[in-house]
Amino acid sequence: MYKVIVADDEPFMLEGWKTMIDWQGCGYELCGTATDGEEALELIGLVNPDLVVTDIQMPVLDGLGLIRTMREELRYDSQIVIVTGYSEFGYAQQAIRYRVNEYVLKPLVPEEIHALLRNLIIPLDTQRQEIEKGYAQEPYESMELLDTHLDESDMIEEVDLEKMTSRAKQMLALIEAGDVTGIDRAVDEMMHEMKESRAAGDWNQSAVRYIHGELLRRYGLIGADQTLLQAQTWHHTASWHRGDLKQLFVRIAETFATASQTDTGSGGVVAEAVQYLKEHYRSKIKLQQLANHIHVNAAYLGQQFKREMGVSFSEYVHRLRIEEARKMLRRTNMKISDIALELGYHDAEYFTEKFKALTGELPSLYKTNNQG
């Protein structure tokens, strides 16, 4: 079993990582979770994980700060997976610099995570074999070899980093534009620059993986079929060559163009959840109850709901209730405490607090100003 820790400040995400992923079935042991980068660093010191999965946006110490500390200060060579659900990724240079292995787009899709974990077994097995081989030598010689490896990876020139970042962003622009000729030329130029770099292997893998991560995010935003992005080609880094990348990028460009012209709408489980909430928001509703009603995992529903609606499940319920409260305050002579009870709030003070937070006014003042 390979040891893994997960860092994410969203409770639904952490719950999803714990309950939706078959870690043991994929060859891993989930050894702990953290809600920020500092907690993750403490866990890393205790667990010495083979794989670290981290969100980018976290309090105290964010994901990139965590990765930087791991690579530069602690000299950890663990596999790293970045999790992102934000519309602006904006971390190309740092992700390439710190040799991020894979990218995951929120919300979690168990089948995709399981495929990713199985693909990571290959580099993890290779890494473990190299370490065991090193330990078979004299102790001091082994340590010297490991230190030399880390030093060489840190000596990559800034000019190489800038070139690879620029090439990765250029490739994304060409793919989105559907420029087949440009893709052909850019792949040739990118592969040539990678070959000339002193760290060609690292640049090759990191730059293409950054492109992969960005495409996952962008495909998710337009609702496109991500079949091409699940292809094994992305993970077989040792066999990459110009023809493979050109063919893959061109096919993705064609798919991207088709998807961009299609209005997919939100639909699915979130649309069903919203309809249910609009009909039952006066009742006491729990996420698990709603998930059971539409036959999906609660953690997945919570993640997907926030992604599509922009607010959490509970916040959406509050908005429905407060909107109805405004109508009742304008149209009836009901007491505020009775309105609160009618809308599922058993504490009038809590209702008043939520009403003011969402409207900027106290219910009593709103009623005075809006009853004619």
Image (cartoon, rainbow, N blue to C red):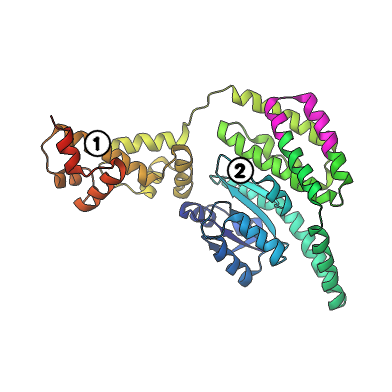
Q: Residues within 10 Å of mark 1 (few under 14, many from 20)?
A: some
Question: Under tag 2, what secondary structure?
Answer: loop
Residue 182 part of the magenta-drawn span: yes
The residue depicted at 58 percent of the width and 64 percent of the height is 40
List the residue tagged with mark 2. 89
Q: Amino acid at mark 2?
A: Phe
Q: Quadrant of the C terminus?
A: top left
Secondary structure mostly seen in magenta is: helix
Residue at image coords 81%, 34%: 187
Question: 132 and 24: which one is in front?
Answer: 132
Q: Nearer the viewer, residue 247 or 150?
A: 150
Read off the residue under disc 1.
324
SS for callout 1: helix
Q: Earlier in the sequence, mark 1 or mark 2?
A: 2
Horizontal arrangement in the rendering, residue 141 relative to residue 124 (left or right): right
On screen, residue 149 versus residue 303, left or right, reads right
277 shown above or below 299: above
Q: Which residues are magenta?
A: 172-190
Tell me the kind of residue under disc 1. Answer: Glu
* Position of residue 64 measured from the top left corner of the image (x, y, whole percent): 62, 55
Name the spot of residue 106 as percent of width and height, x first: 55, 45
